[in-house]
Amino acid sequence: MVSLELRPRPATADEIEAWLSRVAAEYAADIAGSGSLPPEEARQKADSDLRAQLTDRGGQLFFRLIAGEQPVGWLLLAVPFPGGDPVMAWVNYVQVDEEFRGRGYGRQAMLLAEEEAAARGMTSVGLNVLGNNTVARDLYDSLGYQVTGCR
């Protein structure tokens, strides 16, 4: 299947709220599943952490990734990375919706992140990825990202 070129569109307040609810529920399930907190405390922590990530840091850019006219994913970019290098952007979240994976959109999303960062004067982009996420790690490696720590 031929993929369409992605473009970033600023996410609306309603889209962000829906995203927050979905991602907070997933994050809370991960926290509770790890055994570190009971489910109710995990839900509170997840919601608090995600809202802080969006509101407590300046320079947050929240995009819907659009292919043609279809939203296919999300990109959350901090420009610059709070508390870090003043010319380094940070990919806080990037996701291609499951039904659109395998079409090259992940690569395009990362290239868009780099373009958005460069347009704002940033000279580098950083991100975190779980060590067991081999698909993402392979993508980042192919784009020239270097591992600086692993867990």
Image: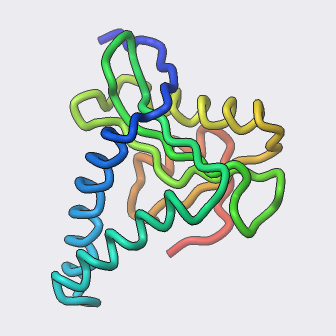
Identity of the residue furthest to the left in this view? 39
Number of numbered markers: 0
Residue 100 quadrant: top left
For the point 66% across and 56% down, which residue is it?
58
Residue 27 quadrant: bottom left
Q: Does residue 56 appear left or right of residue 83 in this picture?
A: left
| Residue 77 drawn above or below residue 128 | above
Viewer-nearest residue: 150 or 62 = 62
| Residue 6 drawn above or below residue 123 | above
| Residue 34 drawn above or below residue 149 | below
Q: Does residue 79 appear left or right of residue 98 in this picture?
A: right
Please provide percent x and percent y for residue 20: 32, 54
User: Coloured how?
Assistant: rainbow
Residue 16 quadrant: top left
Q: Does residue 45 appear left or right of residue 49 in this picture?
A: left
For the point 71% across and 38% down, which residue is it?
117
Please provide percent x and percent y for residue 78: 63, 51
For the point 28% across and 63% down, which residue is it?
24
For the point 77% across and 47% down, which residue is it?
124
